[in-house]
Amino acid sequence: HFPQMNHQEIPPESNLTEVMEFVLLGFADIPHLQWLLFGLFLIIYIIILMSNGTIFLITKMDPALQSPMYFFLANFSFLEICYVSATLPRMLMNLGTQRRSISLVACATQMCFVLMFGATECFLLAVMAYDRYVAICNPLNYLLVMNHRVCTQLVTGSWTIGIPVQIGQTYQIFSLPFCGSKEINHFFCDIPPILKLACGDTFVNEVLVYIVVLFITVPFLLILGSYSKIISIILKLPSATSQAKAFSTCSSHLMVVVLFFGTGITAYLRPNTRSSEGTDKALSLFYTILTPMFNPMIYSLRNKNVITALRKLL
């Protein structure tokens, strides 16, 4: 994906002007739809805040939802609110005001938070897969293995493991000289479009970007490992009713994994060309905004305990 980029050569020292701000083009190529997009994304943002906030609230308040599974779900819902808030408010402001400029510091901050929350989501989904693995493959020791201390450590690790790496990654990228075009053909400050604007040799940065891919693929492989064990255990269960019940406890999580990792891996590993910029934007839109909107629906509509708790709250 990255080594195929065409970079500008560093101009002579006298011609090198320091870029202090960028322009997020977003959806500037469809000017007649700006207000329609503003209304659509505002509704999506409200839905994400309300649905994820409701799930977070009921998992904290309802006594029936105090198991490790719902502890992870509460953290996941809170993370989705943080993740989407790193991109959507800025995009709404750009659509509403038509002022698309973003300072260098704001751009770096946005990129850092998107990378940190994205890494947290990858690891938290892996932790949730491990939770389902213990629940199905070792049910008698489930509460012993997944005690409160272990759950807290797993969640804390998921939130913190990516912080130093992603801060270092962001610092490395924004230490580069930028010259020429200031236009970012994206709706948020993502790594590939920013590296396209850098001058000179960015080979080291492009290699470091594969750390992002590592943060996606390692948890994904752990999830695949967990689910291969889960499926082999489920298929050995004596009755079809038992199999259906076991599948239903992990099917929601599996759907979320496919949505998030499928679009994320496709976005970062597909070949990069000029014509692919629109596809990159569409894929990014899916895993940063649409997936957080679908997740509460997937978890609530397929979970009887969540539906019962929701009815009690309402």
Image: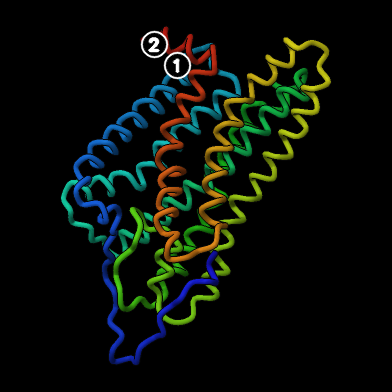
Direction from residue 117 to residue 36 in the image, left or right: left
- Which residue sits at x=58%, y=37%? 257
Percent position (x, y) of residue 80? 44, 37
Q: Residues within 10 Å of mark 1 (few under 14, many from 20)?
A: few
The residue beneath circle 2 is 313
> Does 204 appear above or below 246?
below
Q: Element at badge 2? A: helix
Q: Residues within 10 Å of mark 2 (few under 14, many from 20)?
A: few
- Which residue sits at x=33%, y=78%? 179
Q: Element at badge 1? A: helix
- Which residue sits at x=69%, y=15%? 244
- Which residue sits at x=72%, y=35%? 226
Front position among marks 1 and 2: 2
Q: Give the quadrant of the N terminus.
A: bottom right
Earlier in the chain: of badge 1 and badge 2, it is 1
Direction from residue 192 to residue 40 in the image, left or right: left
User: Disc number at residue 106?
Assistant: none
Q: Give the quadrant of the C terminus.
A: top left
Q: Nearer the viewer, residue 34 or 108?
A: 34
* Amino acid, disc 1: Met
Percent position (x, y) of residue 125? 58, 37
> Does 148 appear above or below 214?
above
Marks 1,2: beta carbons within 8 A: yes
* Amino acid, disc 2: Leu
The residue beneath circle 1 is 61
Corner quadrant of residue 289: top left
> Does 240 appear above or below 103?
above
Q: In the orientation shown, which residue stands out farthest toward the left?
A: 97
Q: How is the image coloured?
A: rainbow
